[in-house]
Amino acid sequence: MADVKSPFLNRRLFLGGTAAAVALPAFAQNDADTTEFRDRVGAVRRNASSFRALDWQPYFDNTRNGAILVDLSSRALHYWGPDQTTYKLFPTSVPLSEDLTRRGRTKVVRKVEGPEWRPTPAMKKRNPDWPDYVGPGPENPLGTHALYLSWTYYRIHGTHDTRKIGRRSSNGCIGLYNEHISELFALSKVGTQVLVI
């Protein structure tokens, strides 16, 4: 009997096999696949910025010494070189809340490779267990490079914690991936104008 080939049986086996093959990817999904799917449909938010290229003219009169625009809503930093042939766009971290946020015009007043970090008095008040000082290195919240702004306590700096980029995660500063702040550090100079919007 096993040798008898019934068209009905063959069709049933074909349909059953096809249904199993189609369903197999759903059963084979691991947690990463499910997370990726949820990311696409919006149930889980990724930390990537949704930003677009911008022109410098609506924001600056000129690009002498370069120009940096930080767009807090899109979590992006734009850089234009002095001769306008260089344009860079980087994803950023932004302040956790409005009370930590500062907007307006400032400029780069100092550049430091291997910065030291000390929490501000307000940070220490909010987080009394934080250390008073962290030297350069992998534990430093300022990452590998920092651009000090004319506003006290505000910086554009790197971070070793890459999960922060694209999120509201800073205590007021603008954070970049270490490789991006290294690139921006090389391009910018003391006197580069900065606008935070």
Image: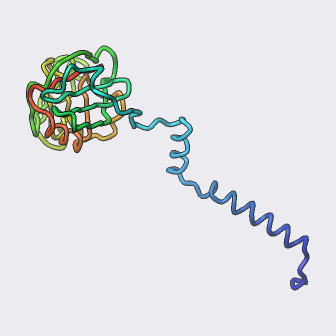
Relative to 124, is 37 above or below?
Answer: below
Which residue lies at the image location 18% right of the left edge and 42% below the top edge?
A: 182
Which residue lies at the image location 17% right of the left edge and 23% below the top edge?
A: 193
Q: How many labels does the image show?
A: 0
Which residue lies at the image location 23% right of the left edge and 26% below the top edge?
A: 173
Is 58 situated left or right of 45 in this image?
Answer: left
Q: Which quarter of the rendered picture does the C terminus lie within? A: top left
Residue 148, percent from left and from top: 13, 27
Relative to 177, is 8 above or below?
Answer: below
Relative to 106, is 148 above or below?
Answer: below
Q: Which of 59 and 92 is in front in this view?
A: 59
Which residue lies at the image location 51% right of the left edge and 46% below the top edge?
A: 36
Q: Is residue 94 visible?
A: yes
Quadrant in which residue 85 is drawn: top left
Is 15 situated left or right of 147 in this image?
Answer: right
Residue 91, percent from left and from top: 32, 35
Quadrant in which residue 70 is drawn: top left
Colour pattern of the rendering: rainbow
Residue 71, percent from left and from top: 32, 25
Residue 162, percent from left and from top: 30, 41
Q: Which quarter of the rendered picture does the N terminus lie within? A: bottom right
Relative to 26, is 63 above or below?
Answer: above
Q: Can residue 139 be seen in this view?
A: no
Is 103 situated left or right of 16 in this image?
Answer: left
